[in-house]
Image: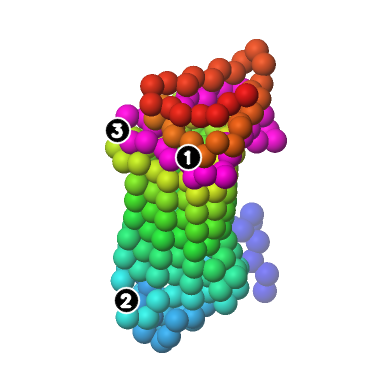
Amino acid sequence: MRLLLSKVKIGSGLKQRFFLLLFLCCLFSVTKVFSQTTYTWTGSSGSDWGTATNWSPNGIPGSADSVLINSTSVSPSLSGNVSIAQLTINSATLTLNGNSLSTSTSATFSGSVVTAGTLNLNGSLADFGNTVFNASIVSTTSDVFFYGSVFNQPVNSTKTGSSDNYSDGGDTFNADINFTVSGIGYFALEYNFDDTFNGNIIVSSTNPNGIIIFGTRGGKAYMASGELISIGSQGFQGSLQLQNFIQQGSDLLQLNLTSGTSSLYLDAGTILMVW
């Protein structure tokens, strides 16, 4: 027998309960689709990132999930490319094995080591704190901070947000680094401590109100002999301020900023060979 609801008269109380049940079912379905899980690394079954029993709760982090990695006796190792929403790593080692790890909301590194691969960081935050990076980095985030870290592979970092970002400094960059501002506000380095640049520095600004500052307050920027600071292929439309920027060497530099919208400031403490 076929039951046609259009032909059945439902009492008001029963009708209310029916629609409440229908609403709860829909709500549960939507919640299930958009739910996000925070997975904490345990390493209880080995080092493979893709093993469900290495995580608490059991499972493999997906693109909507957050990941927390603390110091454990067994460190995680990737066996393929991984995409997650959020990464927080504290006093731990992460081995990428030539693969890429991508985030869509934020990534925070503290007192850790990341090796052999590529970090693709997107969203609201990239926070590079007291960590050794033996992996290349491509970050495009609203806010970005550098402090106390060592970068042994190329770094390409774009600040897209409107907040002023002050990085504490104390970093060593042993490969080329590309800083880009596409939003407004300060992208300021060496706020308290010195940075050492042992690779070339490329700077770009695609926003007339974007500002990149070296040697912001208490720290200095030291560029090694034989390395250069130059304008990237996207040009420079904003303000480039070199304060306490020290070129170690005698290579001549040529800084071609975008005419009409850009400005270059060479402040006290800066030593450059410019032509």
Contact between marks 2 and 3 (CB within 8 A): the answer is no
**Spatial CA span between label 1 and label 3:** 19 Å
Crowding near pointer 2: few (<14 within 10 Å), some, many (20+)?
some
Q: How many marks?
A: 3
Residue 174 location in percent, x, y? Answer: 50, 54
Query: Residue 248 — which label?
Result: 1
Tell me what residue is drawn at x 32 percent, y 60 percent.
Answer: 111
Quarter of the rendering occupied by the N terminus: bottom right
Crowding near pointer 1: few (<14 within 10 Å), some, many (20+)?
some
- Residue flagged by tag 1: what amino acid is it? Gln
Asked if residue 51 lies in the magenta stretch, the reply is no
Query: Residue 218 — which label?
Result: 3
Residue 31 visible within the image: no
Q: In terms of image quadrants, where is residue 180? A: top right
Q: Residue placed farthest to the bottom in the image?
A: 45
Which element carries disc 3, helix, strand or loop? loop
Front-lying residue, 264 or 133: 264
- Residue flagged by tag 3: what amino acid is it? Gly
- Residue flagged by tag 2: what amino acid is it? Thr
Tell me what residue is drawn at x 38 percent, y 26 percent.
Answer: 269
Front-lying residue, 130 or 79: 130
Query: Residue 72 — which label?
Result: 2
Residue 91 location in percent, x, y? Answer: 31, 65
Asked if residue 218 lies in the magenta stretch, the reply is yes
Q: In terms of image quadrants, where is residue 245? A: top left
Question: Which-is-in-front pick, marks 2 and 1?
Answer: 1
Tell me what residue is drawn at x 47 percent, y 21 percent.
Answer: 266
